């Protein structure tokens, strides 16, 4: 598909994308790279990161991968600092790492609930906390004419109402949405950082969909979609690109 944006819309910017080696995160990494950004992808599984970095580089994208778990504060710190050391600045943090599985509340242990809260909610906060120094206006690597950086949190829509077997994810994504609003207020005011969220509905061809919606549910669900199709990773990547570029300066 041809991009509606100019190829240099994020040229010179450096993006760190958690969960950036698969699914929606990888599409964001790819489209940021295709539009001029350098990208660092963070993920738990080395072989997935290696293959993502190889595919990004094959497109001519300046990319590096870091293995790490957003649940571990020491990993978050190491990956943020390594990204800065490698590229000399950080402009965009995308929090796309997420954990998910289908389970009824009575079958979900408190530790299972906590695990998803830790990945999605606490992990997002930890990454924001570690990246703040580099994203704030006047921070390391930023010139005096640079604005503050951008944080983009990827959530979902299932917590807007209620969803079967997703109590842990709904709670975690609601927490991230709250964080997005609070950081937009406080870090926007204090540090000129733009903080936004994207809440995808069901998106095809992602680990989330293949895990959460078996094929027969998937095809049935399409009957209830106004456009009779699932969303595409491309849609989310284009929204991410808009919000992270100077086109989104007022967003
Ligand atoms: C019930 C489960 C479970 C399951 C894990 N647990 N899987 N409980 N059903 N299927 C419980 C365990 O019993 C344990 O609790 C606790 O969770 C921790 O499990 P571990 O296996 O030790 O955790 P870990 O190895 O760290 O893995 C965490 C994980 C991970 C969340 C299960 O495998 C993961 O993140 N996988 C999914 C990645 C993914 O699908 N990403 C896309 C997200 S899509 P106890 O009490 O036994 O110790 C998305 C979109 C949402 O977010 C919106 C869609 C519309």
Image (spheres, helix red, strand yellow):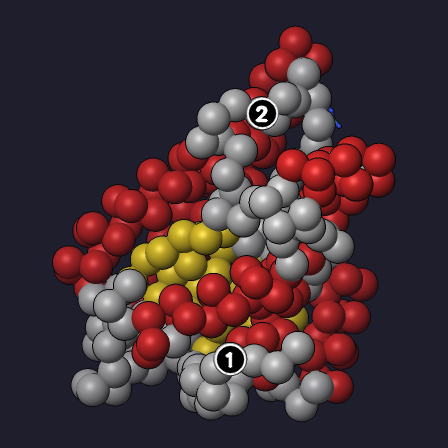
Residue occupying the far left of the picture:
189
User: Residue 140: x and y, percent?
Assistant: 31, 77
Q: Nearer the viewer, residue 31 or 75?
A: 31
The answer to whether residue 174 of the structure is visible from this angle is yes
Q: Are marks 2 and 1 in contact (CB under 8 Å)?
A: no
Q: Which residue is mark 2?
A: 163
The residue that mark 1 highlights is 4
Whether the residue under disc 2 has CB within 8 Å of ligand 1: yes
Quadrant hosting residue 92: bottom left
**Of callouts 2 and 1, which one flags the residue occurring earlier in the amino acid sequence?**
1
Q: How many marks?
A: 2
Q: Quadrant of the N terminus?
A: bottom right
Q: Is residue 46 visible?
A: no
Tell me where residue 43 appears, x and y as whole percent: 65, 58
Q: Residue at x 20, y 87 (%)?
A: 145
- Secondary structure beneath label 2: loop
Q: Is residue 108 above or below residue 225?
A: above
- Ligand 1 positioned in quadrant: top right
Q: Quadrant of the C terminus?
A: bottom left
User: In 3D space, how far apart are the residues under numbered discs 2 and 1 (Cα atoms)?
Assistant: 34 Å
């Amino acid at each position: 598909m041809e991009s509606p944006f100019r190829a240099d819309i994020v040229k010179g910017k450096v993006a760190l994308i958690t969960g950036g080696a698969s699914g929606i995160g990888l599409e964001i990494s790819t489209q940021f790279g295709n539009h001029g950004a350098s990208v660092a992808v963070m993920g738990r599984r080395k072989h997935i990161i290696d293959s993502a970095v190889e595919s990004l580089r094959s497109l001519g994208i300046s990319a590096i991968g870091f293995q790490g778990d957003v649940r571990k504060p020491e990993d978050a710190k190491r990956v943020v600092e390594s990204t800065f050391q490698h590229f000399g600045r950080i402009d965009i943090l995308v929090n796309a790492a997420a954990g998910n599985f289908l389970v009824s509340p009575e079958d979900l242990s408190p530790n299972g609930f906590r695990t998803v809260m830790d990945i999605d909610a606490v992990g997002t906060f930890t990454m924001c906390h570690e990246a703040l120094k580099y994203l704030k206006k006047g921070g390391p690597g930023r010139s005096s004419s640079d604005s503050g950086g951008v944080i983009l949190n990827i959530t979902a829509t299932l917590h807007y109402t209620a969803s079967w077997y997703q109590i842990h994810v709904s709670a975690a994504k609601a927490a991230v949405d709250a964080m997005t609003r609070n950081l937009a207020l406080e870090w926007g005011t204090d540090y000129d950082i733009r903080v936004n969220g994207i809440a995808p509905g069901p998106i095809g061809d992602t680990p989330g969909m293949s895990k959460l919606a078996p094929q027969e549910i998937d095809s049935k669900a399409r009957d209830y979609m106004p456009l009779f199709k699932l969303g595409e990773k491309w849609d989310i990547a284009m929204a991410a690109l808009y919000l992270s570029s100077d086109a989104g300066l007022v967003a």
